[in-house]
Image (cartoon, helix red, strand yellow):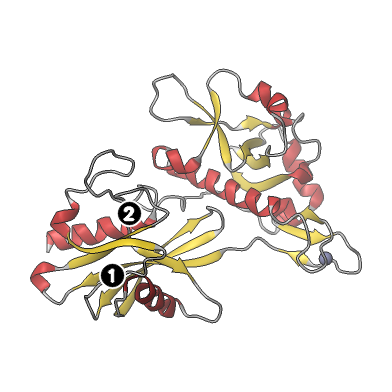
Amino acid sequence: MIYYRDLRLDRASDKRKDRSWLRRQWTRRRCRVLVLRHDKSLMRWPQASAPVPEVLHLPQPEVDRLVDDPEHAVFLGLDRAGPLFAIDASSLSERELEPYLLGANEFIDLRDVGWLLDAEQAAQLAYARGLLYWNRHHRFCGVCGHQTLSEQGGHMRRCGNDSCGRMHFPRTDPAVIMLVEDRSDPARRRCLLARNSRFPSRMMSTLAGFVDPLESLEETVAREVFEECGIEVGDIEYQASQPWPFPSSIMLGFRARALTTEIRIDNDEIEEAYWFEAGQLLDFGEWGDDGDSFCLPRRDSIARFLVESWKEEVLKS
Ligand SMILES: [Zn+2]
């Protein structure tokens, strides 16, 4: 299972260029709005002990006092239930938000609950988060520094300086993530897992890194593995991808075969790295567990998918 890629919305990317069409969607009786604040989403715990929160889709009139102009909302798309928008409440005070935080309502980080939610709703929240983040961080033109204005339902920002007028579009930064396998002894296949200094203690994961300018994806895989762990790799094969709007990436998953096996960690980003056989991974704990055993990456990450699918393949063979 790869999370955050089950977005079953019609993005209506042609229609959203039409301002009057967008305004009509905003005022439709079936228009629903997601509310986010500092990247967290407004949700509700149905009961105090409920394990899964409920995503709140507010009817548009209920957010009228938060957004006076639909230009300040982002348009996500259409589904059978109608239009879906999202608004960013980051600049609003606690007091202004009080009516929305009654009872069991709460702003919750999607990364803490993503795998508990319905896959489609998790994808919608991820999409809203990425798009609102981009809008919040591109309020000024990177060319002339003038203020930018949202168009196309938040899918484009145009510089407000007439002599510039540059159009800015949401960007997605490609990053590679790879499971490196040692097959030098076919009876004892091993995978390379490492702990980045930013990870919680004991959490081991696959290596990953951003694509440099003018670099092919395969070159990035080979460079990152060598830089971080001193291992040379070949047979680099694409596996799967995952939209990763935390804040603005797409993760491109690969598998690579180790040509050397002596680990030399960079001691900068990587704190520890080891080879593991598939059977050893069965003893790994869950992300967030206490205790001394190694932990798997978070359930919503493609790292987890790469590790689990490799483990199952090896154990079955
Ligand atoms: Zn400009």
| Few, some or many residues within 10 Å of mark 1 (<14, 14–19, 20+) | many
Provide the residue designation for mark 1.
180
Q: Give percent across and percent down for residue 27.
A: 76, 36
Q: How many marks?
A: 2
Q: In the visual, does 315 lie left or right of 241?
A: left
> Does 172 appear above or below 231?
above
Q: Tag 2: Cα neighbours inside 10 Å, few (<14), some, or many (≥20)?
A: some
User: Upstream in the sequence, badge 1 or badge 2?
Assistant: 1
Decide: is 100 above or below 179. above
- Residue located 77% across and 42% down the image: 70
User: Of 213 and 291, which appears nearest the observer?
Assistant: 291
Indicate whether 165 appears above or below 294. Answer: below
**Label 2, on which residue?**
304
Quadrant housing residue 151 = bottom right
Residue found 15% across the figure and 55% down from its top: 280
> What percent of the width, then of the height, locates residue 141?
78, 62
Q: Residue at x 73, y 59 (%)?
A: 156
Residue 8 percent location from the top left of the image? 51, 49
Residue 244 x, y percent position in the rendering: 49, 56
Q: CA distance from mark 1 to mark 2?
A: 14 Å
What type is the residue that disc 1 sits on?
Answer: Val
